[in-house]
Image (spheres, rainbow, N blue to C red):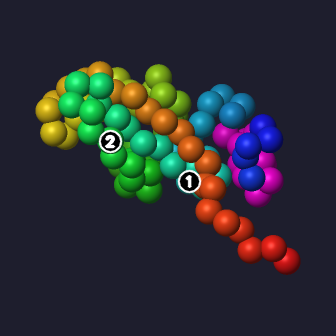
Amino acid sequence: MPFLAASIDAAYMAGMSDGWTLQALIDAGMSVTGGCLDCHRHQKLDLPALRDRFGADAPAMEWDLRPKMKCAVCGGKRITLTYSPDTSPKTLR
């Protein structure tokens, strides 16, 4: 896990015992971007809204989310998901 920030290690380990949950992704500062393979549109998912709709403990692995998704533009169901850590600069103390 060298590419993940040290501040998310605990959330990463807790979230990965049975796979990510929506709350674990939020706590770890992760973002998830959905991409349509049909029209090539991409959109960052609103994780807090998904948590509010499906619950904090809802599974958030690719195989859990992808079957529930479709493109808002073309209606395509061929969706890819990209999980990314927070890479914004951190202040040093």
Extreme bottom residue here? 93
Q: Which residues are magenta?
A: 6-15
**How many neighbours does mark 1 have within 10 angstroms: few (below 14), some (14-19), or many (20 or more)?**
some
Residue kind at label 1, given as amino acid type: Ile
Coordinates of residue 33 in the picture (x, y in percent): 42, 42
Percent position of residue 11, x then y: 71, 48
Marks 1/2: CA distance? 20 Å
Q: Residue at x 74, y 52 (%)?
A: 5
- The residue singled out by tag 1 in the image is 26
> Per the image, is 13 magenta?
yes
Task: Name the quarter where the N terminus is drawn.
Answer: top right
Q: Decide: few, some or many residues near mark 2? Use Cα within 10 Å; few <14, some 14-19, many ≥20.
A: some
Q: Is residue 71 left or right of residue 62?
A: left
Number of marks drawn: 2
Q: Position of residue 57 (x, y in %)?
A: 54, 42
Instruction: Residue 31: tell me if it is visible.
Output: yes
Q: Is residue 51 magenta?
A: no
> Could you tell me the amino acid type at mark 2?
His
Q: Farthest residue to the left: give it.
A: 74
Along the line of sight, the residue nearer the viewer: 16 or 35: 35
Q: Residue placed at 27% from the left, 39% from the top?
A: 41
Q: Earlier in the sequence, mark 1 or mark 2?
A: 1
Of residues 7 and 11, which is closer to you in this image?
Answer: 7
Q: Residue at x 16, y 30 (%)?
A: 75
Residue 71: x percent and y percent?
23, 35
SS class, disc 2: strand
Outermost residue on the right side: it is: 93
The quarter of the rendered structure image containing the C terminus is bottom right
Depth check: give the residue in front, 74 or 53. 74
Q: Secondary structure at mark 1?
A: helix
Disc sitting over residue 42 in the figure: 2
Specify whether 72 is left or right of 59: left
